[in-house]
Image (cartoon, helix red, strand yellow):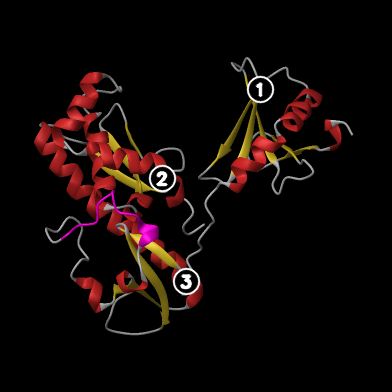
Amino acid sequence: MGAERFMRRTYAQGEPATEELSVPGLPIPIRIKRHPRARRMTLRVSQCRKGVVLTLPRACKSREAHSFITKNIRWIKQHLNALPEEVAFTNGAVIPVRGTPHELAFVGRTSGRGVVWLSPRQEAVDRFFEDAAPVRATQDFSSSTNHDMCKLNIAGDEKHAPRRLQDWLIKQARQDLTDRVAFHADRLGLTPKRITVRDQSSRWGSCSTTGALSFSWRLVLAPPDVLDYVAAHEVAHLREMNHSDRFWALVRQTMPEMDAAKSWLRQNGAHLHAYGN
């Protein structure tokens, strides 16, 4: 059966058409991107968006795209199966916060405790980067036991709890990132213009030519030194807008133990995108 039978175009208000290719045996359609500078067909499985993207030269025919998909179907399935399982923000779910596992408890309407709060046993480690045994990137979240687990309580109607929790996590991420950016900027004699925290899907942090820093809120899910490393990384870009030896020397100057955090993020970062989707 020809590729034309599988291809369809979808339209969004004010946006150009997007091609999708539905292939038998795959649970999701493949997004088709035509790039004017592409010289060959390339496949990519997006870990954060849980999708498959096929980039084509602009003149590539649909029949050729379908043949390319067919030849690589095993590769696609292997990579889709390797994606981390999604964990929705639901009552009883377990999510990491600053690298420590927390069980979510939707407690309904209550008064006097705020919107989100930690159970008493966790309050001693609520703040990030305290001197008493901070969680490091060398520790494995998956190896934590129920004894180590903390409880995160979310008040209000259950239908609003996921959004309330995400808002709280964004606030925690902003506090931690503001602290660590200030620390590294002071150490390197640099001054960021502003800090933005949002749900970035393509990168953990970025630095604009105007000195504005932007970060993913999901960094607050990781062990603290991982967030610290990304903060140091973006602060260093205020001086070196590249990844030259001079840039890495700056990062190491302000965070000598950067290697473990950098490695953790490379190996485990995709799992942070599995939470709350």
Above or below for 202 versus 64: below
Secondary structure found at label 1: loop
Question: The N terminus is located in which quarter?
Answer: top right
Q: Nearer the viewer, residue 183 or 93?
A: 93
Residue at 69 percent across and 47 percent down: it is 28
In the image, what residue occupies the spot 73% across and 31% down?
69
Q: Is residue 50 left or right of residue 107?
A: right
Q: What residue type is labelled 3?
A: His
Please check the rendered image and state whether residue 173 is part of the magenta-colored stretch, yes or no. no
Measure how far apart labels 2 and 3 are at the Cα level: 27 Å
- Relative to residue 167, is residue 213 depicted above or below? above
Residue hosting label 2: 269
Quick one: label 2, few (<14), some, or many (20+) residues within 10 Å? many
Stretch in magenta:
133-143
Q: Which residue is drawn at 34% across and 43% down?
A: 264
Give the mark, 2 or 1, whose residue is nearer the N terminus: 1
Residue holding disc 3: 160
Residue matched to label 1:
41
Q: Position of residue 245 (x, y in %)?
A: 24, 19
Query: Mark 1 to mark 3: distance in Å?
Result: 43 Å
